[in-house]
Image (spheres, coloured by chain):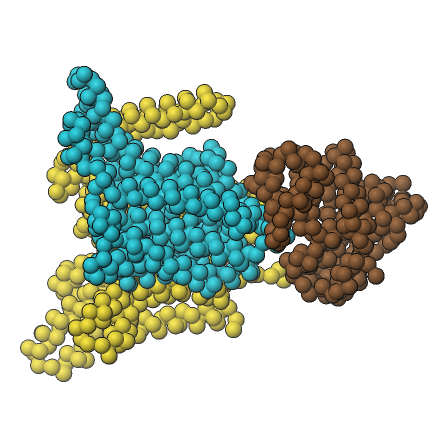
Chain colours: A cyan, B brown, C yellow
Amino acid sequence: MEAMTDIANAIVLLLNFIVVPGLSYGSQLALGALGITLIFGILRFANFAHGDTMAFGTMVTILVTWWLQSKGVSLGPLPTALLALPVGIVFTIAIMVATDKLVYQHYRHHKAVPVTFMIASMGVMFMMNGIVRFIIGPNDQRFLDGERFIVRARDFKASTGLSEGLSIKVSQGLTIVIAVLLVLALFWFLQRTRTGKAMRAYSDNEDLALLSGVNPDRVVLVTWILAAILATIAGTLYGLDKSFKPFTYLQLLLPMFAAAIVGGIGNPIGAILGGYVIAFSEVMVTYAYKKVFVYLLPGSLEPSSLMQLLSTDYKFAVSFIILVLVLLVKPTGILKGKVI
Amino acid sequence: MSFLVGSNMVGGYGGADILKGCTIGVDEGEIAVIVGPNGAGKSTAMKALLGMLDLTSGEVTFKGKDITHLTPQARIAEGIAFVPQTSNVFVSMTVYENLEMGAFLRHDDISQTVEQIYQLFPVLADKQHQLAGELSGGQRQQVAVARALMSQPSVLMLDEPTAGVSPIVMDELFDRILEVRNSGVAILMVEQNARQALNIADKGYVLVIGENRHTDTGEALLADPEVRRSFLGG
Amino acid sequence: MSSENKTKLAFAIVAGLLLIIGMAQSWSVALGIFNLCLISAVMALGVNMQWGYAGLLNVGIMGFAALGGMAAVLVSQAPVAAAWEAGWAKLLLAAIFFIATVIGTRFCYRKMSPGRHRTISMTAIIIIGLLLTRYWLDPAVASIEAIESAKTGFLGGMGLPIIFSWIFGGFVAAGIAWVIGKVALGLRADYLAIATLGISEIIIAVMKNEDWLTRGVKNVTGLSRPVPYEIDLQSSEWFINLVSWWHSGALSALNEADQAELLKQAVIESSSIFVKLCYSGLFASVLVIVLLLSVKALNSPWGRMMRAIRDNEIAAGAMGKDVTRRHLEIFVIGSAVVGVAGAMLTTLDGQFTPTSYQPLRFTFLIWVMVIVGGSGNNMGSVLGGFLIWVIWIEAEPVGVWLMQFGTSWMDEGNAVRIHLIDNAQHMRLFFMGLVLLLVLRFSPGGILPEVVRKRS
């Protein structure tokens, strides 16, 4: 009986510290990576401004959330930010479409090489970063309200009698639910609608899509809109789950790029898969397993160290090492992506 | 007066002129074939009809209308379809989706056209839910032609449809092309396999360095001793 | 305008800007900016070698600059004998196991045929090797960090004059660049960019975490200097004499008491300027050396081959040029130059703070310098280094001033106005982006584009 409880405790530990955080962080990365991969598939460049686009959308959402909160509007147990989200999305769409018209369109019409687009995206990154810091400042912002937990560690312990608790935050649950819904909607759009098919065709074979009568300007426009929606939602969910800080969003670029490339760049399913691969690797490699082993091993074999493979500050290293490994073993990514 | 005709076309891709005054045309229910040595501008001539390069002089008319200044997209909307030599299918999409993309500009019911295509290329019916990228070379060419036919074009242009396929597949493909011709579509194609192509051609053009060298019926060109000696290997 | 005149004019404008800053703010400020301009120019030259000569997109500049900074610590700090004593043996064992792991993995990869067996053996070697490394490393780290952790808690350095770190920093950066290049240079341009971005983050993470090596976030302050200290100057006779000679005109008009007061004031001011001038001299020498070598290299057969590879990799490869090898060379050399600049920067700061390395400032800003100045043109990169640094620094006060001016119609205590003025400093990021985009759009070659020499 005691052995059973020990095993149950160990499982709860893993659930609490690896599975739940991995799923929610993975969903956030997946949504971000989807935006990157869509832009790469259609516009054929790695968009360095994507992290700051997320920051921009989140910032608008936060500002509207604060305004709603000051008016006394709330969603009860759910965060008010959900109400503000559509406004954030609209603003982000506007700024992305404007950026395309003012910056990228020129290079597209002149058939510039991808690297030029990439450097232009660095310029956009600077500008967006400046705007965000100018408006909301460089510091941490919190905008989460409503209920904090779906499952509280204390309640969990009380109801199961285990000594380890499982807690699931509302933000984590929301992240997973919204990500699933959003991904389903995106795939329905790409697979079933005329515009979605045109986008896939354009991504697959630009010349042939043009020969089939696909309007490139429309495809590009829809891509920016989708990327803006994904970026704003991903950014807001990340901000609700952790906290909002412009610099953190810039740093998210690396795991998101890694997720998109690891899964197979240009391939939406790959981006989702990549998001979870990166997130789970980060969480698993930086988790200290000592307690798990304490439960599972007999007292004499208990580990003395933390049993942590890498310190948490090395999480970027994890995404990067996976990225390099995949590129060396299978340059097109786990699922076949584009090779240009 | 041909159905689709480019007359006295001069132009290239921005550098030196590749076309130096050539005239290419095709009529309804007719197969016209462009043959000639490498670098003669065969594909370029065809792309000029589609509007993929700027002509410095000459004009293109379609159904009696001057389309010289229309974009390729506009010409496609007018009823011209084009099958490129390479990368001519959407590899990450199913066969059926490829057909759908071919009918992208149509807003009516396409199921009947799809049925016709499946009758023409029965193998595609079996593979309709398979990714085009997973098909064999010959099957891919069929998808490519089928995709172009989905727009119900009045002119079908093919750029070396038999490049890289086996002789058996080539014969089959030519049979299909004849069937398409019989349904009233005008067909213009560029071919490396000049002898076989001229065999099924109603009209043949022999292009050399961007100019018409010989223009006649396929049969007559095959019989012409000079054409035979210079371009058909005796 | 001929390109030579354009170069002269562009530099005259930068010099004019610095003069205006000197007169409007102070000469000390202007010199401070000038010194960082020099460092930025060296860094931009390094990046220009990679991007301008060879078309390699290195987005990991921050990492190489930080390696140079670390070198400054490792060269100049006195060794901590107790820490060495406590940890050297275990550290050595850890190093041996780590190297053995790398060699073993490589051996497996080379000698075994691809397949499941190879994958399993390699994974096993890596896991066992890393566990053994950690087995020795962890206690070594613990004992090193335990030694006076508030003061040292790390191994210290070699106790050499800090100026040697400029060379050492170059070598450290070159060594790491070689390893990275071996792995990443086969990748496509955009993957290489992302890979280098990742590596730079890892380098910073290592510096923040490996306290035994760099003291981590506890920082290393009070690095030694290659130039005199202000306080020493102020009390040395020759310097006071020099200052009184310089100001003799103004001094002679005053009575004795005022003279002494003015002289004291002048000595304090001059000592700071003198120190900065010393740095300027050192940095300028490095810049000139790097620039001369770059110009020479760019015009040599090697430089021509490099540009040929950049312009058409496939053709160059077909002509028998070893593209990957050349790329590796230029990647290593360019990174080394960035490392030198990074060491210079830490020397100037007098402290090493891993948290100060941020990608916008240390990677993307340098990119703006190279693109705006003119990629492929050495003088262009130097100009970009100067111009962008001046704008970067001055955009802050100018932005605040503009915001104050623009909102002067509002109430003094208006919350919007306070917010706008407080956050005006962040607008410089916006301006940097704008400058980059405008140049990229309307003058894609930069202010001083690459000079395409025609065969005469």
Residue found 64% across the figure and 33% down from its top: B126
Q: Nearer the viewer, residue C221 or B99?
A: B99
Q: Nearer the viewer, residue B120 or A277?
A: B120
Q: Nearer the viewer, residue B10 or C411?
A: C411
Image quarter in which the C terminus of chain B is found: top right
* Count of residue discs: 0
- Indicate the position of residue A76 as horizontal and vertical percent values: 22, 50
Q: Using residue C321 as the reference point, say whether residue B181 is left or right of it.
A: right
Q: Quadrant of residue B5?
A: bottom right
- Indicate the position of residue C176 as horizontal and vertical percent values: 37, 41
Image quarter in which the N terminus of chain B is found: bottom right
Residue that protrudes farthest toward the bottom in the picture = C253
In the rendered view, would you say A121 is above or below C173?
A: below
Q: Using residue B104 as the reference point, say whether residue A286 is left or right of it.
A: left
- Indicate the position of residue A301 as horizontal and vertical percent values: 20, 18
Residue that protrudes farthest toward the left in the picture = C257
Residue found 41% across the figure and 56% down from its top: A122
Kindly tell me whether residue C53 is visible in this rendering. Answer: no
- Indicate the position of residue C155 as horizontal and vertical percent values: 20, 38
Kindly tell me whether residue A131 is visible in this rendering. Answer: yes
In the rendered view, would you say A157 is above or below A30?
A: above
Residue found 37% across the figure and 60% down from its top: A91
Residue found 71% across the figure and 52% down from its top: B153
